[in-house]
Image (cartoon, grey):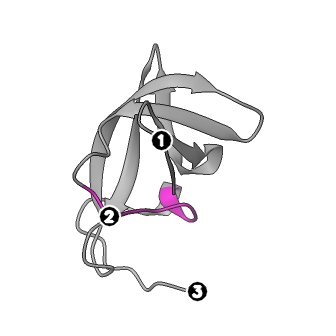
Amino acid sequence: FGESPEYWMIPYSALLDGDRGKGYVYVTDDKETVSKVEVTIAGIQKENVLISSGLENHKYIINSGSPYLKVDSKIRIVE
């Protein structure tokens, strides 16, 4: 996902339950199971959300199918 020193730019579709500068994103570090992490929203652009914190220690975000996931769901990566 897009990254800069100030924020990460993620697709709007990856953000869950955004409200008052906070939201949640599903992430995976092993490409097999998901975790739900709280993120701080720095701003919203047309189709992207700027995240200022919460993704520091994670490798991949889940961009598609997030509403159907829960913590520890098993996933299959489609590239």
Q: CA distance from mark 3 to mark 2?
A: 16 Å
Q: Nearer the viewer, residue 65 or 7?
A: 7
Q: Residues within 10 Å of mark 3 (few under 14, many from 20)?
A: few
The residue sitting at 45% across, 34% down in the picture is 7
Which badge, 3 or 2, is on the more N-terminal residue?
2
Q: Is residue 49 above or below residue 61?
A: above
Q: Amino acid at mark 2?
A: Lys
At numbered mark 3, what does the secondary structure look like: helix, strand or loop?
Answer: loop
Q: Nearer the viewer, residue 43 or 63?
A: 43
Which badge, 1 or 2, is on the more N-terminal residue?
1
- In this view, the residue farthest toward the top is 20
Of circles 1 and 3, the one toward us is: 1
Q: Which residue is mark 1?
A: 4
Q: CA distance from mark 1 to mark 3?
A: 24 Å
Q: Position of residue 38 (x, y in %)?
A: 30, 36
Q: Amino acid at mark 3?
A: Glu
Q: Which residue is mark 2?
A: 59
At numbered mark 1, what does the secondary structure look like: helix, strand or loop?
Answer: loop
The residue sitting at 27% across, 46% down in the picture is 56
Q: Nearer the viewer, residue 24 or 50?
A: 50
Q: Is residue 66 above or below residue 33?
A: above
Query: What's drawn in magenta, residue-wise?
Result: 58-66
Q: Is residue 34 above or below residue 21?
A: below
- In this view, the residue farthest toward the front is 5
Q: Amino acid at mark 1?
A: Ser
Q: Which picture quadrant has residue 72?
A: bottom left
Q: Residues within 10 Å of mark 1 (few under 14, many from 20)?
A: few
- The secondary structure that dominates the magenta segment is loop
Q: Position of residue 20 (x, y in %)?
A: 46, 13
Q: Position of residue 79 (x, y in %)?
A: 58, 86
The residue sitting at 49% across, 28% down in the picture is 18
Label disc, if present, on residue 79 of the rendered structure:
3
